Amino acid sequence: GAGVSQSPSNKVTEKGKDVELRCDPISGHTALYWYRQRLGQGLEFLIYFQGNSAPDKSGLPSDRFSAERTGESVSTLTIQRTQQEDSAVYLCASSLATSGGTDTQYFGPGTRLTVL
Amino acid sequence: QKEVEQNSGPLSVPEGAIASLNCTYSDRGSQSFFWYRQYSGKSPELIMFIYSNGDKEDGRFTAQLNKASQYVSLLIRDSQPSDSATYLCAVTNTNAGKSTFGDGTTLTVKP
């Protein structure tokens, strides 16, 4: 079956522009996660959706970042007025969010964002 | 103090040796623990998960969990050059709906 897909795969933008990143989770996965990974660093949690609601927005680094999810499917991460420090790979993951704690996250290929 | 700590490495072992990767966590409410492998330029992929104290074996991989010590490890037996990657430890508190990743340990297996 299809895995998690993300688009675009690469995005180069100028400082100050807005960008929108898209994630299509695995069908039937109710949980969706966004992470940021800077070069040579670990995963930085940004936001988590359970269905269409986001119970944990604590990782969003500033009010320039926002995310939404509709129809318990596609999610978009929007970065307004991009800054050079926003340059990173943005990873999306989805999971079944089953009880019992064995909730494996499946990752998409990521969007590499470069802010000039 | 980070919520999930891993030795950054790099960890270098000869081919055929045992590689030992360690992870400690601070949230005692954590219920499940995952090891992901990430090749350079690629996305993380799951190797194993564990949620009960003790050992869990899958082929050449063994995950060990000690909740009292808040410690989880991954052993790779008969290491192969293809095991060379960054290994990420992830800790999930299902009640909080939160997964926290460590920064990863880079493993190099030398032929």
Image (tube, coloured by chain):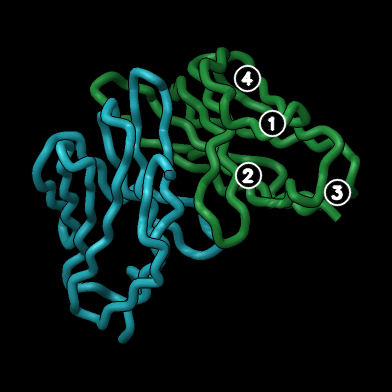
Label 3 Cα crowd, 10 Å radius (few <14 / some 14-19 / many 20+): some
Residue indicated by mark 1: A77
x and y, in percent, of residue B70 in the image: 23, 41
Residue B74: quarter of image? bottom left
Query: Which residue sits at x=39%, y=68%?
Result: B9
Residue indicated by mark 4: A69
Q: Nearer the viewer, residue B93 or B70?
A: B70
Are discs 2 and 4 less than 8 Å apart at CB? no
Residue type at numbered disc 2: Tyr
Helix, strand or loop at disc 2? strand
Q: In which quarter of the image is the C terminus of chain A?
A: bottom right
Query: Which residue sits at x=90%, y=41%?
Result: A16
x and y, in percent, of residue B86 in the image: 42, 62
Residue indicated by mark 2: A90
Q: Which of B82 and B49 is in front in this view?
A: B49
Host chain of mark 4:
A
Label 4 Cα crowd, 10 Å radius (few <14 / some 14-19 / many 20+): many
Relative to B7, is B75 on the left or the right?
Answer: left
List the single residue furthest toward the front.
Answer: B1
Host chain of mark 1:
A
Are discs 2 and 3 less than 8 Å apart at CB? no
Label 4 – label 3 distance at C-alpha:
24 Å
Residue indicated by mark 3: A13
For chain A, give the colour.
green
Host chain of mark 2:
A
Q: In which quarter of the image is the N terminus of chain A?
A: top left
Mark 1 or mark 2, earlier in chain = 1
Label 3 – label 1 distance at C-alpha:
15 Å
Helix, strand or loop at disc 3? strand
- Marks 2 & 3 on one chain: yes
Query: Which residue sits at x=58%, y=33%?
Result: A46
x and y, in percent, of residue B5 in the image: 37, 50
